[in-house]
Image (tube, rainbow, N blue to C red):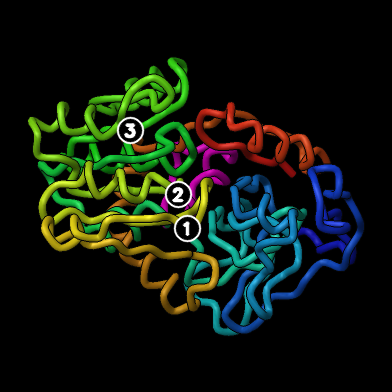
Amino acid sequence: MEKLPAQMTVVAISKPGGPEVLLPEQRTVPQPGPDEILVKVEAAGVNRPDVSQRAGSYPPPPGASDLPGLEVAGEVVAVGGNAKKHKLGDKVMSLVAGGGYAEYCIAQDAQAMSVPPSFSKTEAGATPETLMTVWHNVFERGALKPGETLLVHGGSSGIGTMAIQLAKAWGSKVIVTVGSKDKADACLKLGADRAINYKTEDFVAEVKAASSGTGANVILDMVGGDYIERNYEAAAVDGRIVQIAFLGSPKATVNFTRLMVKRLTHTGSTLRPRSNADKAAMVAAIEAKVMPLLRAGRIKPLIDSTFPLEKAADAHRRIESSEHIGKIVLLA
């Protein structure tokens, strides 16, 4: 194993603001704690929470790096004293609480996963955050079952494209909402049964039509706002709505009668503030139930574009344009 440098290049948030505040700088290479590993980053996924953190509205949890970046892939170059899952030289991909926009990043040993042999470094860097978000919210919180119908808002996003593939692998029907024909075509190619253009179609009416009037059993929503009440209309009896973000407003006026009449469950979650034990449990479940699909090549993240680490500002401009289809990844 090569000797580690003392310094590394990172991309830091110089002050709250637009993409231009993301600036390269030099920092000391971190050392892993007892339960941690140090990853030489080859790829880091770009996610909406990174944008929120850059804008000043999503501070890192206590003890986490102030650098953006919630998922990385690369080589293990140092291990803590209690780290037993991974060893030096292993290729891993991991959710991290921050610090991904860097040449080296600390990860929890229990949260890191071995990179499937068929995955490129770009695909590995695009996987952990979306995979864990979809697994926890669609399957653990939403309890999606084979034969049920899943509605995904933002179907062409990194999370949406992963949700399509996982739900289809589970034997479920998938309906998505998108904002263009290109995005609809991409989702249908991935296996979605119906892609609804929310700009020209009423998703409530279209979901009911596509489900023989039943509605969606599980709805994964990252929009909020007036979608909340419309989700209640589009949901099936005993439906589960899972809130993972608010690209629209976090506030809405809702007729909650439907919640009672349809016996709906409206839940939600965030991933970053969860305890290490919670995240490790999610990873263990994914390794048992989902990783075989990734190793077999049945599920892979859809890649929109890649940018060099130093061009993180351009990657943020891309994600904020909402024109991307799939994941945006930084290459170190």
Residue 114 highlighted magenta (yes or no): yes
Tell me which corner region of the image, top left, top right, bottom left or bottom right, holds residue 19: top right
Do residues under tags 1 and 2 come within 8 Å of each other at their CB atoms?
Answer: yes
Q: Residue at x 44, y 79 (%)?
A: 277
Does 137 appear above or below 35?
Answer: above
Disc sitting over residue 176 in the figure: 3
Q: Provide the secondary structure element on which disc 1 rests.
A: loop
User: What's the amino acid at mark 3?
Assistant: Val
Q: Looking at the picture, how far across and down is residue 96, in whole percent?
A: 59, 64
Lower sequence index among marks 1 and 3: 3
Question: How far apart, in angstroms, are the residues tagged by discs 2 and 3?
Answer: 18 Å
Q: Dot 3: what SS?
A: strand
Classify residue 145 as left or right of residue 282: left
Quadrant of residue 227 within the rendered picture:
top left
> Which residue is tagged 2?
225
Bounds of the magenta segment: 113-132
Where's residue 139, x and y in %?
26, 56
Residue holding disc 1 = 251
The residue type indicated by label 1 comes to Lys
